[in-house]
Image: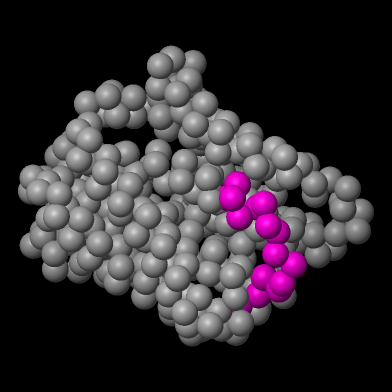
Amino acid sequence: MQKLTLAFPVWALLVSLWAFFMPSPFIPLKGAIVPLLMVIMFGMGITLTVDDFKRVLQSPRLIGLGVFLQYAVMPLAAFIISRALGLPKELLVGMVLLGSCPGGTASNVICYLAQANVALSITLTLVSTLLAVVATPVFTWLYVGQQVPVPVGDMLINILKVVVVPVALGVVLNTFLGRHIERFKAVFPLLSMLAILLIIAIIVALSQQKIAAMGLLVALAVVLHNLTGLASGYYVTRCLGFDKVTARTIAIEVGMQNSGLGVALATKYFSALTALPSALFSIWHNLSGSVLAGYWSKTPLNSSRTAT
């Protein structure tokens, strides 16, 4: 299983190339993304217990740190990087809008594969989404002077459906039948990796034309933005004295935005060009997250995954 995990970044790159040059087999599978995510979340749930979430909720300082870094670092980084690279106004707006979005569900999956604190990741995603109704429009307005309504109700319903319900079912099953399903638990990491590879292929196929048309500066901006979030999340957390598992979790949560929301808001309130950074980010953060998951899984940590 570990060998498969280590090879995951390579497979992610290969399926991305396949989907880019041969998108037609994957485009009809667009509707499979949500069910695949639900299967992954259920697999996470059967590795968790109610106590995992209780420990997270007993550490409000840690939750506050994750949310603070999410909204303090990412919009500012988007603005600075865009200005430094001289991006035109539409792309600058798109970058700041992306940086002002909450954490995405993909971060929960990458935390699972990276052997990070999944309960903390899910909690941070939920909290940052709740705050998005205020944070996303405020930071977008603050940096680029544009007001953007955020459909937080729809977002929360989606998170409940895709994340909370499947994870809760898995936790319940683990709580009452944990000993009886122990031998099946090892299957879910493999299923999760296969599901993520398929999701990446579908996203690349759907975005093939935008990828082909994008400029190198936009690609560079998105890569720098993602790396800034990952690095700041990890090193700030470590500097504050938290353990490596917690630092991994916050790094992934801060570095991986809800790019789907960014695309939807940019398309609705701005232009197709404004949506380009979010569209590209949806591909890149899965690839960079896959690399991190593969790297961190080389040295599994035996220390507690609870917030400390």
In the image, residue 307 sits, relative to residue 232, either above or below, namely below
Task: Please tell me which residue lies in front, 121 or 49.
Answer: 121
Residue depicted at 45% across the width and 24% down the height = 17
Left or right: 233, with 168 as reference point: left
Q: Position of residue 84 (x, y in %)?
A: 14, 55
Q: Is residue 155 visible?
A: no
Task: Please tell me which residue lies in front, 244 or 256.
Answer: 244
Write down the region rendered in magenta.
Answer: 293-307
104 drawn magenta: no
Q: Looking at the rendering, in which quadrant would you find the C terminus? A: bottom right
Q: Is residue 247 visible?
A: yes
In the image, residue 26 sits, relative to residue 82, either above or below, namely above
Q: Position of residue 232 (x, y in %)?
A: 39, 67
Q: Looking at the rendering, in which quadrant would you find the N terminus? A: top right
Left or right: 280, with 243 as reference point: left
Quadrant position of residue 142: bottom left
Residue depicted at 81% across the width and 65% down the height = 175
Q: Position of residue 118 (x, y in %)?
A: 61, 62
Left or right: 147, with 114 as reference point: left
